[in-house]
Image (cartoon, helix red, strand yellow):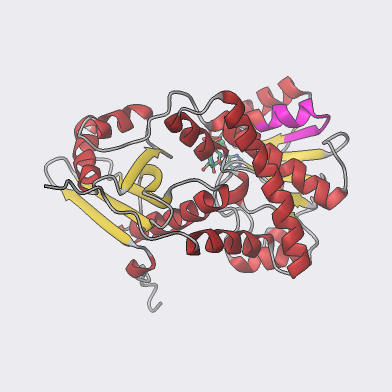
Amino acid sequence: MRNGAEAAPDLFATEQVVTCRDDQVGLRAVIAIDDTRLGPGFGGVRYRRYPSPSAAVEEAQRLAAAMTLKHACAGLPYGGAKAVVLDDGRVADRDELFRRFGDFVARTAGGYIPGVDMGTTEHDMQTVRSRGARAFCADSDPSPWTARGAFAAMRAAVQHAYEVDSMTGLRVAVQGAGHVGAVLARLVAADGGHVLVADVDRERAAAVAEEVGGAVLDPEQVIEADCEVFAPCAVARVLTATTAPRLRARVVAGAANDTLDSPEVARLLVRQGVTYVPDFVANAGGVIQVHAEQSGHDRAQLEAAIERIGERVAHLLADAAERDVTPEDAAESLAADRLAAAAGRWRPEVARS
Ligand code: NAD
């Protein structure tokens, strides 16, 4: 990069990138379909401001690639995809914006299945669906299932790192007391753990701490909290080459997407003796729940699928230790094996005449 210029995204890192524009309603959107070897691309739609169109394309591609890994590791019949709708702060009619976006989704002929993500709602997905596009609209909030999956991952990781079968006596620092973090805090406390919780919304943190008999931490200091487990459940890229060495926890398992800011941090954590559960493995509970809902699975089937996250984590951590690779590398090889075994790429059904 010269003169602070932005690097252009590698468009061909992704199977298909669709840019969408409609000046009448002020729509600018990007649909990134990363890989369809396991099925049509499924992934949420983000609606937020971006510093530039390139930044939006890059985020859609990066998040779509993570969805490919998430679905492959969880054994779900979807490819990875993500869409971003650029918020320029000037849109007059949100419904019209999402109707037009729905037209673009419909043009992918089912190759992209959107769902709710940061900045979008179930209502937006209903609007997308009203244009004939396939969209996953959950009947219920998947966050509690994401929390249950993250908890299963955490239990497997503490078993691996501390050789214990429950959270009894372990201190868990939860970063973010939102939809997932609050439920995760309850699960930890119910299993005998001591919750330390931090949120930029201090009232939210205080309410969760009070409910579970825990304590509130300063959000600036949560990474270096004196505890056994750090559970990131707020923002992306919290572990960097600068922050990771400050961790005192020996286990990191949480729901936040994109927790490490580079593969180098995964190696750094191994050198520090920290057991890190790859985020795309730990936070798959939400997509597992959405899939179960779409497939008409009953609650027992869903619960069993969520519990399998714990088994998967135990297997991945043992595999990583045996092969002397990072858990992230082990999870990526599991995904690569499943993708390589797929019969071909997803294709729309073509009407035969
Ligand atoms: P949420 O918006 O309900 O909660 C996030 C919380 O984090 C909020 O209370 C917010 O105030 C707090 N927060 C923001 N910045 C913070 C900071 N710097 N330090 C401490 N707290 C901060 O979101 P959520 O649905 O609970 O999701 C949490 C994370 O899990 C996100 O990264 C999300 O992408 C990821 N995730 C969620 C799901 C799901 O089912 N909800 C599924 C997969 C991944």
What span is colored magenta in the figure? 184-196
Residue nearer the viewer, 124 or 91? 124
**Residue 163 falls left or right of residue 120:** right
Q: Quadrant of ligand 1?
A: top right
Q: Quadrant of residue 307?
A: top right
193 part of magenta stretch: yes
Q: Quadrant of residue 234?
A: top right
Residue nearer the viewer, 227 or 284? 284
Residue at the image position 50 percent from the left and 62 percent from the top: 341
Task: Point out residue 298 in the picture as x, y percentages from the top left corner.
Answer: 54, 25
Residue at the image position 57 percent from the left and 55 percent from the top: 237
| Residue 245 seen in render | no
**Residue 219 falls left or right of residue 351:** right
How many numbered circles does the render carry?
A: 0
| Residue 137 seen in render | yes
Task: Point out residue 143 in the picture as x, y percentages from the top left corner.
Answer: 55, 31
Q: Quadrant of residue 217?
A: top right
Residue at the image position 53 percent from the left and 50 percent from the top: 70
Quadrant including the N terminus = bottom left
Residue nearer the viewer, 8 or 41? 41
Task: Point out residue 233 in the picture as x, y percentages from the top left corner.
Answer: 61, 41
Above/below status of 53 relative to 78: below
List the single residue furthest toward the bottom.
2
List the single residue furthest toward the front.
353
13 part of magenta stretch: no
**Residue 227 falls left or right of residue 145:** right
Task: Point out residue 196 in the picture as x, y percentages from the top left corner.
Answer: 75, 35
Above/below status of 236 relative to 244: above
